[in-house]
Image (cartoon, helix red, strand yellow):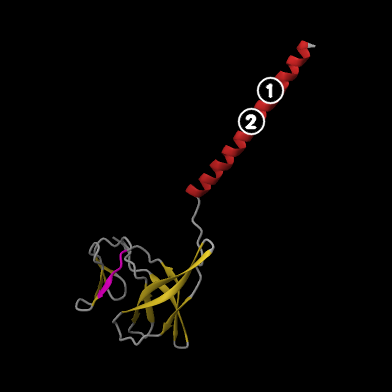
Amino acid sequence: MADEDTYRKIRRRHFLTGTIYALTSLILGAISGSAGAYLLGRPREENREEWTDAGELPELRFGTPQEITFERSRVDGWKVLNEKSSAWVILNDDRTLTAFSPLCTHLGCAYQWAAKEKQFSCPCHGSRFGPRGNVISGPAPRPLDRYAIKIEGSRLWLGPVKQTAARNS
């Protein structure tokens, strides 16, 4: 009888030990999988094809960029945030419009239009861009990024920012 009780205790102990190891492995596997997906996974691209009404078409002169500001909605989790944004819009010689992202392609600083030099100038690290967004000088690795544009009536609509290709060295 004592041998049978000892045998049952040992079987129960092995069963409980195995169950604890299995549950621990399951929990660690779930945590590792989640951490791996977070650290190694791709970020989700939200609202990449969303268009924003940037307002009435401004009065533009050929070759002279004008900064416009507009409000853009962004979803952050369960909140919808309205943010002020801007773009540099230029009327090209062929009567087409180009809208540049307001951020330098080097480190994302805001640049300004230098009217005397007829170029965009980034105050952070000295990058300079021509009126067509091309790199003139500086550490910027590529031309200015551009918004997709569409015109409906007299309204300017800006789409997602399209990243430009790096310049050839």
As helix, strand or loop, the secondary structure at mark 2 comes to: helix
- Tag 1: residue type? Arg
Q: Which residue is mark 1?
A: 13
- Tag 2: residue type? Ile
Residue pictured at 38% horizontal, 66% vertical: 164
Residue 151 appears at what percent x and percent y? 46, 83
Q: Is residue 119 covered in magenta?
A: no
In the displayed structure image, the side of residue 105 where residue 147 appears, left or right: right
Read off the magenta span: 109-113
As helix, strand or loop, the secondary structure at mark 1 comes to: helix
Sequence-wise first label, 2 or 1: 1
What is the quadrant of the N terminus in the image? top right
Mark 2–mark 1 Cα distance, whole angstroms, equals: 10 Å
Residue pictured at 22% horizontal, 64% vertical: 126
Q: Is residue 71 above or below residue 166?
A: below
Extreme residue toward the top, this view: 2
Q: Is residue 33 above or below residue 79?
A: above
Q: Is residue 21 above or below residue 90?
A: above
Residue 156 appears at what percent x and percent y? 43, 82
What is the quadrant of the C terminus in the image? bottom left
Q: Which residue is mark 2?
A: 20
In the displayed structure image, the side of residue 16 where residue 37 appears, left or right: left
